[in-house]
Every structure is written in structure tokens, then in C-alpha cells.
Amino acid sequence: MEATENLNSIYISDKAKIKVLNLMSESGVAKDDSYFLRVGVVGGGCSGLSYKMDFDNEVKPMDQVFEDKGVKIVTDLKSFLYLVNTELEFSDGLNGKGFYFNNPNASRSCGCGESFAV
């Protein structure tokens, strides 16, 4: 099921989708439909807040569930307040390799791209 373009969601770029699906396959959870990508925000990092990502298969009562480009993305309610309308991106260029969040809510982020402030 493809998500329609709507406000107040979490999105994933085409490159990030490919990388997430590859990592799920390498982890052995790709064939299990109960697994999804969990994203969140925790205190810490140079700018005050840091992103976290993992594969999970347990949706908690206050979780927010989204689907974009066929990828199920879940976050807790508190993290969603910081991640609303954020897009998960992936870069494999010369300037760095890895996932990063294109977060319109961040007022500043650190040089490593792993932490931010609002």
C-alpha cells in the first residue's frame, strides 16, 4: 500500500528505501511482515537531540505508524513531535555515507548530521 502525499507524516527517499530493504534482508527480517523501521529522537549529541533507527516488530500503544513507498515507519508520539514531515535520506557520496534526516523542524544541526536542535 503506497501512502498518499499528506501532511504530518514521516517520509523516506527512494535511495533510503533501497538501503533499508537491503539491511532488512541482511538482518534476516525482510520476509517477516511484522518487522518495520522504527525511528526516534533521544536526548544527547552536540546539538541536544539525536536520531535513532532500528528494526522492530512490536508496535506500542502510543506509537505513530506511517507507510511511505511501501516501507512501514513507526515512531513514538514524543519523537513524532520532532520528526513531523521529516524525510529519511541516504547518501553514498564522497562527502559521507549513511542515513540522515531531512528535518524541517530542526533550527540547527551539528556537522556530523546525527544531532539537531529545535
Image: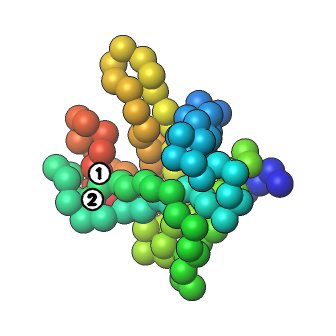
Q: Nearer the viewer, residue 71 or 89?
A: 71
Left or right: where does residue 95 sit relative to residue 71?
left
Q: Which amino acid, by three-letter code, is at mark 2? A: Leu
* Label 2 Cα crowd, 10 Å radius (few <14 / some 14-19 / many 20+): some
Instruction: Give the residue at the far top of this rendering.
Output: 94
Q: Which amino acid, by three-letter code, is at mark 1? A: Phe
- Kindly identify which residue carries mark 2: 49
Instruction: Give the residue at the far left of this rendering.
Output: 46
Q: Quadrant of residue 22?
A: top right
Sequence-first tag of 2 and 1: 2
Rendered residue at 43%/74% (across/down): 78
> Compared to 11, does 17 lie above or below?
above
Q: Nearer the viewer, residue 36 or 10?
A: 36
Say if residue 39 shows up in the picture. Answer: yes
Q: Are marks 2 and 1 in contact (CB under 8 Å)?
A: yes
- For label 2, the SS is strand
Report the Cα–Cα distance between label 2 and label 1: 5 Å
Rendered residue at 42%/62% (across/down): 40
Q: Position of residue 13 (x, y in %)?
A: 61, 37
Rendered residue at 40%/33% (across/down): 98
- Kindly identify which residue carries mark 1: 116
- For label 1, the SS is strand
Quarter of the picture holding the C terminus: bottom left
Q: How is the image coloured?
A: rainbow
Q: Nearer the viewer, residue 6 or 10?
A: 10
